[in-house]
Amino acid sequence: MGNGPVMSDSATTRLKRLAHRSRYRGFKEVDLHFGQFAERHLAGLSDEELDQYEALLDEADQDVWAWLSGARHVPARHDNRVFERLQAYEPVL
């Protein structure tokens, strides 16, 4: 009947919530980076990857920016494939 997997309401709600949090963090560079990454990649992340992404959203903007820019090493708790993808992503400015 459908054209692919059907996402449950709770999964759809989670993706919308994460996308919103990604765009409105309060630090312009991080807003752009996370917001555009979320728009392009969130729907393709597994539940485990979404958990990892959400954990990054819980961190302070200044810390995340320092990790993304390479000014500081990413802590072991975020040294995962999701952070690697986020760091490799180049937002359109």
Image (cartoon, helix red, strand yellow):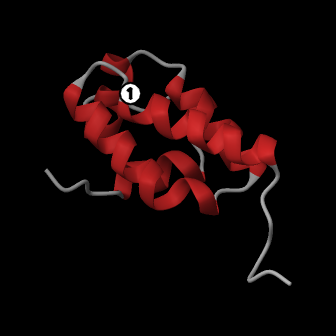
Q: Is residue 25 left or right of residue 77?
A: left
- Quadrant containing the N terminus in the rendered view: bottom right
- Looking at the image, which residue is at 31% across and 43% down? 33
Q: Is residue 69 left or right of residue 48?
A: left
Which residue carries the number 1 mark?
64
Q: Residue at x 25, y 22 (%)?
A: 27
Q: Compared with residue 62, is residue 75 higher up or lower down, i.e. above or below?
A: below
Most extreme residue toward the front, as rendered? 1
Residue 48 visible from this viewpoint = yes
Q: Quadrant of residue 10?
A: top right
Label 1 Cα crowd, 10 Å radius (few <14 / some 14-19 / many 20+) = many
- Percent x, y of residue 76: 59, 31
Could you tell me residue 60's position as x and y percent? 41, 15
Q: Nearer the viewer, residue 31 or 80?
A: 31
Q: Position of residue 64 (x, y in %)?
A: 38, 27
Which residue is at the far right?
A: 1
Q: Is residue 63 above or below residue 35?
A: above
Q: Can I make out residue 76 in this image?
A: no
Amino acid at dot 1: Val
Q: In the image, what residue occupies the spot 46% across and 49% down?
A: 38
| Residue 42, percent from left and from top | 56, 53
Q: Nearer the viewer, residue 8 or 89?
A: 8
Direction from residue 30 to residue 74 in the image, left or right: right
Disc 1, SS: helix
Q: Number of labelled discs? A: 1
Q: Residue at x 37, y 22 (%)?
A: 25
Q: Is residue 67 left or right of residue 71?
A: right
